[in-house]
Amino acid sequence: MKRWPALLAILLVLCPLSPVLGQQDQPATDAYKQMLTEHYPFYTTATGQFAPVYPALARQIVDDFGITEGVCVDVGGGSGALSLALAQITQMRFYALDIDPWAVRACNYAAMEAGMMDRVSGVLGDAQDMLFRDEYADLVVSRGSIFFWPDQLAGVLECYRILKPGGVAYVGGGFSRILDPAIREPLARRQAQAVAQQRIEGFKLFDETLVQRARAAGIEDIRMEREPIAGWWLIIRKPAEE
Ligand SMILES: C[S@@+](CC[C@H](N)C(=O)[O-])C[C@H]1O[C@@H](n2cnc3c(N)ncnc32)[C@H](O)[C@@H]1O
């Protein structure tokens, strides 16, 4: 009974302050997010027009490969949209590695917003020389990044190096084959036009010669999945240990 006056006093002190605290907190968060989108414009794309792509691609990856536990490295993971979508439907731990520090900040911010900071982390690094030890990841995914790697073969070999035996890497770009065509086709058309008109700086497609070079470098199980609408992908498997 004696605690009531003290509790009342605390409430009386806090209640008038709470709207003020809220107001102060809100612009600070918005300003930080604004800064992220200015420095990393793809954050706006990933959370805007591309937003429906990630849940569909995540579902496709889980259905195709059946890997739902362990570690996943998302190479060139940007603001972490694919990692976050995969985290919703798996129990995996995600590291979204990106060469752009603003992408890493955006990923960590997006993970905080999604309440996923314990499972999705942005990390700074280069796809061509990753900071992960050999055989670290059960799954490697990479969407829309390989086209910017100066040495695509080096990046592919790195994806293979960090894979655990029995693991799979799905590396490439485009939109999921299970995404609603009404959403996918306009996106894919716009992307194809941008590529044809060379409007994307530093963008370089890959072809079968990359697969052949990867085989010559020791990756036996690698194939290219080329879908007219859904994109260019490499599927790389590391043999399970005997
Ligand atoms: C088109 S964005 C795709 C981002 C993300 N995967 C997605 O689908 O939302 C390409 C990303 O690849 C990153 N990138 C480019 N070259 C890289 C490299 N050598 N190593 C790691 N990341 C790289 C860029 O910084 C950028 O965030």
Image (cartoon, rainbow, N blue to C red):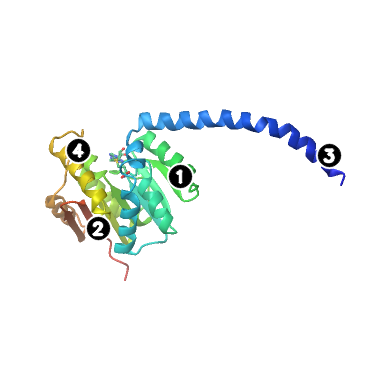
Q: Which residue is identified by label 4?
A: 203
Which of the two marks, 3 or 4, is nearer to us in this view?
3
Which of the two marks, 2 or 3, is nearer to us in this view?
3
The Cα–Cα distance between marks 2 and 4, rounded to whole angstroms, is 22 Å
Residue 125 appearing in the image: no
Q: Secondary structure at mark 3?
A: helix
Q: Which residue is identified by label 1?
A: 111
Which of the two marks, 1 or 4, is nearer to us in this view?
1
**Badge 4, how many Cα within 10 Å: few under 14, some, many 20+?**
some
Mark 3 is on which residue type?
Pro
- Residue 14, given in percent of the width and then of the height, sits at 71, 34
Q: Which residue is identified by label 3?
A: 5
Mark 2 is on which residue type?
Ile
Mark 1 is on which residue type?
Ala
Label 1 residue near ligand 1, CB within 8 Å: no
Q: Earlier in the sequence, mark 3 or mark 1?
A: 3
The C terminus sits in image quarter: bottom left
